[in-house]
């Protein structure tokens, strides 16, 4: 079979040869220029042609050899950065020194200063020709780009200039930098790559940008300070232009932020007032690898993400348990398409309320680790159906915990919520009771723990999907109270926290996350409208409809914030409090179930029983009244 040379390789070979010829001609011109001014110093008294040829050959061989050794001809000069030009200068300098050393050994008469002049002029010529080529290529690309969009880059630092360079030299880029915006007084008014730097401190900067042919504004700075992003986003939103960010991709399927920065739309996660939480993935993967893991409520928003992240950790077997077959089917098909037979997993349609069915599942699979995500979570719905909340949340957790102990599970991790802290609604009170079940089992051979976090962006029932639907319909966005504040995290972050807690769980711990500053729901609504390219109160109205039944103005994460312990992760804490006994929990659960059996669906009697079982359960009016009193002082 005949060898067919690769056309691309042939092209690069020709390009390298052409660059060598260019450098030889630059050296030749430099040599004869120096001969013209310093004939005696370079050629000696004889002026022999052989002397000229030998001296030139010595410089040519030494400079080319040095350039090859430093990889000067392996680069693509149309995209060359400052470092490439600096390396070329250094390579020529080394070649010149090498030529002097060889000339000394061969007793060739040539002066040091004359050699320096030859090398310097040759280097200047090589650098200049390369720069002209690079500039011409850039201009050619610009002429070919007829439908590009002008952008303003906020940040004229290393990241902003790197982005500008990429947009300028990438012939496939649909963007072209129009200006930089920076607050550094030393940079304002100057230019980078011919692009002017405007004053970011100028109060009229938004008006200036609106008048310019700019379509998009790009935030480009290495500081991942969420408050800075939110502040700049709010400020430049006044222009009505689309705002993007030059940053790493967001956390995806439990993986750390890594790889190449991309130009992406600002997402609501950028405006959470804190940096995304990063876990040590290697430690987590080592822990879960080779274990049998059961996820109850595995088809829900949290449960399904847990299944995705656990699948990455290469478990021995994954069991997905859910009562809702449609959700279970969706995650089943997703995992089948992604892993095929590489992942051993099963789907069980069952309710944790059914003790016999739950025991059948545990007896069959004998899971090492149990993540209990199955629960009723909708606050208003559970206010009207407290009996169902008790059956599913309290009794379901008790059944699952019992089976985990009976069949020798290593760990049992309960997915809890910030609404369990001083609860003012049935859902929060039942989740607090679930925490009590976990805390009471500190003496078990199975390690129990609960993980408490705030609202999860994008989860079923969260405000974000609701706001998106309302924006798509043209509004209005409805919020219960303009003062209402909540803690937020991404689904990926929440599941990372759960997996991390699973590693640390020992004796009934209650893990909580330092979630930073809480977010005003009103700000969230306004930002989501802006992210849709619309203007709040002009294109989309925001309507206040009043607090829902059982709703608090402010959520809390800890019962006693002065009694916490640190963990191996600096943003995860363990709340310390005296746990209830198993007998106390069992008596209270019996009292709740007896109340349901006796009084049926008498909502008020069931709530009264729940207040006895959960001492911290209070009426929302009491807490909200105290909040209003504090606000008026």
Image (cartoon, rainbow, N blue to C red):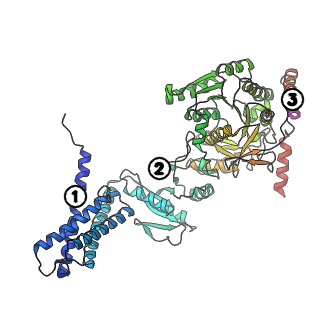
Mark 2 is surrounded, within 10 Å at the Cα level, by few (under 14), some (14 to 19) or many (20 or more) other residues, namely few
Q: Position of residue 562 (x, y in %)?
A: 81, 51
Q: CA distance from mark 3 to mark 1?
A: 87 Å
Residue identifier under label 3: 583
Residue 416 makes an appearance in the image: no
The quadrant in which the N terminus is found is top left
Q: Is residue 464 left or right of residue 56?
A: right
Q: Determine whether 152 is above or below 122 in the image.
A: above
Give yes or no for residue 170 being in the magenta stretch: no
Residue identifier under label 2: 260
Dots 3, 1 in contact, CB < 8 A: no
Q: Position of residue 522 (x, y in %)?
A: 69, 49
Q: Main secondary structure of the magenta part?
A: helix
Going from the N terminus, do you reach mark 3 or mark 1 first?
Answer: 1
Q: Is residue 399 left or right of residue 531?
A: right
- Labelled disc at residue 288: none
Going from the N terminus, do you reach mark 1 or mark 2 first?
Answer: 1
Callout 3 secondary element: helix
Q: CA distance from mark 1 to mark 2?
A: 33 Å
Q: Residue at x 78, y 41 (%)?
A: 551
Callout 1 secondary element: helix
Mark 1 is surrounded, within 10 Å at the Cα level, by few (under 14), some (14 to 19) or many (20 or more) other residues, namely few
Give yes or no for residue 611 being in the magenta stretch: yes
Going from the N terminus, do you reach mark 3 or mark 2 first?
Answer: 2
Q: Which residues are magenta?
A: 604-615
Q: Nearer the viewer, residue 2 or 424?
A: 2
Q: Quadrant of residue 410?
A: top right
Q: Residue at x 77, y 36 (%)?
A: 508
Q: CA distance from mark 3 to mark 2?
A: 56 Å
Residue identifier under label 1: 18
Q: Quadrant of residue 75?
A: bottom left
Q: Determine whether 33 is above or below 562 in the image.
A: below
């Amino acid at each position: 079979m005949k060898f067919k040379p690769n056309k691309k390789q042939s092209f690069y070979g020709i390009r390298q040869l052409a660059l060598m010829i260019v450098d030889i001609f630059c050296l030749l011109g430099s040599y004869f220029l120096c001969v013209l001014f310093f004939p005696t110093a370079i050629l000696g008294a004889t002026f022999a042609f052989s002397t000229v040829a030998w001296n030139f050959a010595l410089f040519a061989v030494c400079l080319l050899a040095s350039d090859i050794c430093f990889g000067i001809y392996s680069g693509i000069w149309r995209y060359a950065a400052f470092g490439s030009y600096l390396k070329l200068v250094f390579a020529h300098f080394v070649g010149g020194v090498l030529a002097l050393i060889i000339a000394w050994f061969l007793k060739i008469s040539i002066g040091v200063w004359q050699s320096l002049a030859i090398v310097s002029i040759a280097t200047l010529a090589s650098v200049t020709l390369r720069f002209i080529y690079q500039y011409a290529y850039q201009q050619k690309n610009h002429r070919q780009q007829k439908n590009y969009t002008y952008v303003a880059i906020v940040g004229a630092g290393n990241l902003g200039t790197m982005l500008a360079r990429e947009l300028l030299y990438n012939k496939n880029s649909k963007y072209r930098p129009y200006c930089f915006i920076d607050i550094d007084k030393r940079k304002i008014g100057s230019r980078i790559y011919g692009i002017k730097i405007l004053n970011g401190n100028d109060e009229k900067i938004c008006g200036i940008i609106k008048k310019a042919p700019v379509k998009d504004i790009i935030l480009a700075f290495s500081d991942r300070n969420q408050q800075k992003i939110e502040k700049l986003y709010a400020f430049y939103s006044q222009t009505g232009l689309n705002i993007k960010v030059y940053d790493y991709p967001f956390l995806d399927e439990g993986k750390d932020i890594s790889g190449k920065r991309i130009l992406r739309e600002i997402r609501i996660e950028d405006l959470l007032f804190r940096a995304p939480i990063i876990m040590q993935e290697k430690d987590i993967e080592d822990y879960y690898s080779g274990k049998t893991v059961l996820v109850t409520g595995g088809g829900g928003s949290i449960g399904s993400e847990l299944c995705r992240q656990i699948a990455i950790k290469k478990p021995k077997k994954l069991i997905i348990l859910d009562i809702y077959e449609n959700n279970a089917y969706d995650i089943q098909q997703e995992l089948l398409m992604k892993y095929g037979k590489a992942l051993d997993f099963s789907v069980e349609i069952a309710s944790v309320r059914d003790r016999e069915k739950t025991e059948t599942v545990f007896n069959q699979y004998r899971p090492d680790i149990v993540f209990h995500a199955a629960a009723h979570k909708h606050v208003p719905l559970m206010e009207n159906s407290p009996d169902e909340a008790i059956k599913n949340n309290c009794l379901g957790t008790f059944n699952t915990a019992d089976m985990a102990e009976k069949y020798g599970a290593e760990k049992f991790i309960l997915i809890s919520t910030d609404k369990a802290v001083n609860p003012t609604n049935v859902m929060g009170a039942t989740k607090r009771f679930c925490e009590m079940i976990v805390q009471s089992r500190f003496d078990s051979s199975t390690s129990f723990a609960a993980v408490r976090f705030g609202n999860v962006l994008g989860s079923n029932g969260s405000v974000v999907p609701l706001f998106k639907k309302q924006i798509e319909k043209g509004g209005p966005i409805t919020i219960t109270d303009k003062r209402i504040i909540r803690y937020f995290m991404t689904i990926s972050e929440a599941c990372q926290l759960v997996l991390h807690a699973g590693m640390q769980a020992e004796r009934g711990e209650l893990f909580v996350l330092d979630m930073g500053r809480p977010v005003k729901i009103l700000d969230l609504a306004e930002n989501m409208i802006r992210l849709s390219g619309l203007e709040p109160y002009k294109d989309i109205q925001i309507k206040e409809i009043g607090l829902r039944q059982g709703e608090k103005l402010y959520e809390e994460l800890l019962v006693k914030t002065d009694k916490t312990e640190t963990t191996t992760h600096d943003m995860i804490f363990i709340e310390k409090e005296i746990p209830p006994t198993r007998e106390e929990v069992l008596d209270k659960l019996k009292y709740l179930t007896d109340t349901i059996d006796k009084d049926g669906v008498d909502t008020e009697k069931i709530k009264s029983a729940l207040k006895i079982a959960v001492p911290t359960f209070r009426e929302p009016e009491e807490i909200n009244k105290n909040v209003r009193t504090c606000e008026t002082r």
